[in-house]
């Protein structure tokens, strides 16, 4: 009973926060706590305790390359519940240069007003046209068939962020349409009871890296500003990061996946969670169970239930 009340409280708070982000409500909600009488006994930290303020988190190049740097955080932002005794360090890499300074971390909500729903498609279309001409990464620009910008709804409540197009995506011009994409589709439809057209899907990189190699830090820095603008335009209520590259690009942390799952971060005020990349699940099927746990956490916060067969 008490737990139900807390859940209702959380959902109400989440919806009010969405309204506030959309500029439809002008009252501070962040510090609202459920009434003491209905505080449940918990074995795990509550969602609000677990909601880590990673708004610090990133958005490297806001409007690359001319974006001004607003606030640079000297070290990667870390979850508040794992405090500072052992700050995470980026492993030294002989192969790659450090992440460029355009990856500066911002503790800033979006400054641009929310784009009216009926204008979003047009704004995204012109951004996609800009991306289609991009030549910031000469190798990718010369090897791609086409850029791969987005899939789904510009008014989606939920945005999935993957790594980069693969061969199928490069050929078809749509994110997550290959084998890993089938898994994403299953997650959305069979797992969450939504359709692909109800969510928004994008990648950190808009071009396929040759041989599907991992994107370099420079490529991520060149491209992440486009993703940031997609997020700014769509303004989803929730973001789900699929795998390490999405985490590196948006959350700027080197923590291992196991300590990033099952908790909430904030990317520019938007509640953001992390789960495994679907390609990892293809060769490590036991991890599907953990992914399912992550999705349940997400659905709970979104106030939606899995379809009967999935539960
Ligand atoms: N396809 C995509 O669009 N993104 C990925 O990260 C993997 C496959």
Image (tube, rainbow, N blue to C red):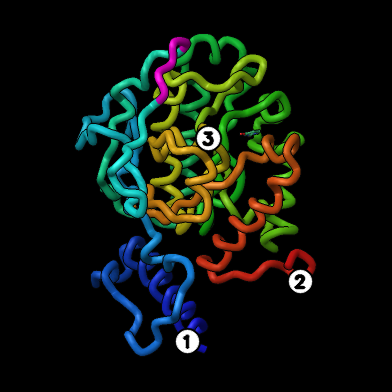
Contact between labelled residues 1 and 3, with CB atoms less than 8 Å apart: no
Q: Secondary structure at mark 2?
A: loop
Query: Mark 3 = which residue?
Result: 244
Task: Give residue 64's mark.
Answer: none
Q: Secondary structure at mark 3?
A: helix
Magenta highlight on residue 93: yes
Viewer-proximal residue among 162 and 274: 274
Query: Mark 2 = which residue?
Result: 308
Q: Position of residue 240 (x, y in %)?
A: 53, 49
Mark 2 packing: few (<14 Cα in 10 Å), some, or many (20+)? few
Task: Give residue 2's mark.
Answer: 1
- Earlier in the chain: of badge 3 and badge 1, it is 1
Q: Position of residue 224 (x, y in %)?
A: 42, 31
- Earlier in the chain: of badge 3 and badge 2, it is 3
Viewer-proximal residue among 28 and 296: 296
- Earlier in the chain: of badge 1 and badge 2, it is 1
Contact between labelled residues 2 and 3, with CB atoms less than 8 Å apart: no
Does ligand 1 reach within 8 Å of label 2's beta carbon?
no
Of helix, strand and loop, which mostly describes the magenta segment?
loop
Q: Position of residue 148 (x, y in %)?
A: 59, 30
Report the image quarter containing ligand 1.
Answer: top right
Q: CA distance from mark 3 to mark 1?
A: 37 Å
Q: Secondary structure at mark 1?
A: helix
Magenta highlight on residue 254: no
Question: Is residue 289 rendered to the left or right of residue 96?
Answer: right
Against 227, residue 103 (above or below) is above
Mark 3 packing: few (<14 Cα in 10 Å), some, or many (20+)? many
């Amino acid at each position: 009973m008490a737990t139900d009340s807390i859940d209702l409280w959380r959902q109400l708070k989440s919806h009010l926060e969405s309204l506030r982000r959309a500029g439809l409500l002008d009252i501070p909600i962040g510090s609202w706590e459920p009434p003491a009488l209905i505080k449940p006994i918990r074995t795990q930290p509550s969602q609000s305790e677990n909601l880590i303020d990673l708004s610090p988190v990133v958005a490297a190049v806001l409007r690359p390359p001319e974006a001004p740097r607003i606030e640079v955080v000297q070290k990667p932002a870390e979850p508040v519940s794992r405090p500072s005794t052992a700050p995470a360090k980026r492993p030294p890499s002989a192969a790659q240069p450090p992440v460029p300074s355009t990856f500066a971390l911002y503790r800033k909500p979006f400054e641009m007003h929310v784009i009216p729903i009926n204008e979003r498609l047009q704004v995204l279309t012109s951004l996609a046209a800009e991306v289609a001409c991009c030549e910031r990464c000469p190798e990718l620009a010369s090897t791609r068939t086409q850029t791969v910008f987005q899939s789904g709804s510009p008014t989606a409540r939920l945005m999935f962020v993957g790594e980069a197009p693969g061969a199928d995506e490069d050929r078809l011009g749509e994110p997550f349409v290959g084998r890993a994409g089938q898994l994403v589709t299953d997650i959305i439809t069979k797992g969450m009871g939504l359709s692909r057209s109800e969510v928004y899907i994008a990648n950190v990189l808009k071009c396929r890296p040759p041989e599907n190699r991992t994107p370099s830090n420079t490529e991520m820095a060149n491209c992440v500003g486009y993703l940031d603008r997609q997020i700014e335009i769509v303004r989803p209520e929730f973001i789900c990061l699929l795998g390490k590259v999405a985490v590196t690009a948006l959350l700027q942390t080197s923590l291992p996946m196991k300590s990033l799952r099952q908790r909430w971060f904030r990317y520019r005020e938007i509640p953001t969670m992390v789960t495994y990349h679907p390609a990892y699940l293809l060769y490590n099927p036991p991890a599907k169970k953990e992914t399912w746990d992550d999705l349940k956490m997400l659905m709970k916060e979104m106030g939606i239930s899995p379809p009967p067969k999935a539960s």
